[in-house]
Amino acid sequence: MQQKLITVTLEPDGTSKIDLEGFADHTCGKVMDDFRGGDRVLSERRRPEYYNRSRGQQLQQGNQ
Amino acid sequence: MSKYAEIATTVRNQAYLVAALAGLGYKPEIHVDGAALVGYEGRERPERAHVIIRRVQIGDASNDIGFVRKPDGTFGAVLSEYDRGIGFDEKWLGRVHQAYKEQQTLVDAKAKGYIFRGREVVQTPEGPQIRLQFAAR
């Protein structure tokens, strides 16, 4: 089972980046909220491996 | 599933702010009802603040630095023109926000049951970048 990791990068300009790895889709939002701490989100996106995995799944389905 | 977000820090919690300033080497005063800031000539200024770094901790020609609690519950910095000019500027405030967010993240994550895995400081041309890692149960 993939480990669920959260990396918070605190930049010297006071902004921060939250990076989630290994979470199921439906738990991502809650974990993100836990670490956001009520602060404003400047940008949000899925990591590239999410799209690679989705594409892989589509290719697999296409081959069936 | 993996997700990535960029966040702007807002200072809301006085305890985290005080801890952040202490972590940066200051001894901030807390004034529940606010207190006057003192200027470089030793006289009280019209500005008041709830968390104050007295000028003796900054420099002989400096004014007090204050953080005032606004009606919306957030804290804003009161910095004189002179002190901005000697380095207590937006860049310095960024470091305060960084230290504040570290306090907030460590305390909140522990309270919510996340496991702290480590802290790493990476030197960048813009200043130190702090990386905190946690695991979920």
Image (cartoon, coloured by chain):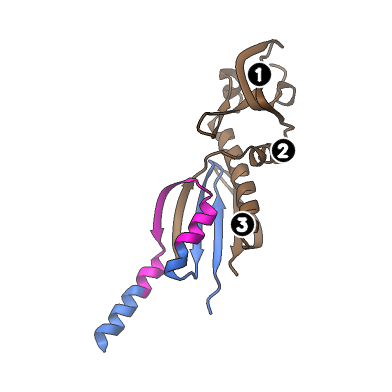
- Secondary structure state at the residue bearing disc 1: strand
Chain of the residue under the numbered disc 3 shown in the image: B
Q: Which chain wears brown?
A: B
Q: Residues within 10 Å of mark 1 (few under 14, many from 20)?
A: many
Contact between marks 3 and 1 (CB within 8 A): the answer is no
To which residue does mark 2 refer? B22
Up-down relation of residue A31 to residue B94 (above or below) = below
To which residue does mark 1 refer? B37
Up-down relation of residue A19 to residue B71 (above or below) = below
Q: Colour of chain A?
A: blue
Q: Which mark is residue A41?
A: none
Contact between marks 3 and 2 (CB within 8 A): the answer is no
Up-down relation of residue B23 to residue B51 (above or below) = below
Quadrant assignment for the N terminus of chain B:
bottom left
Q: Quadrant of residue A58?
A: bottom left
Q: Quadrant of residue B19?
A: top right
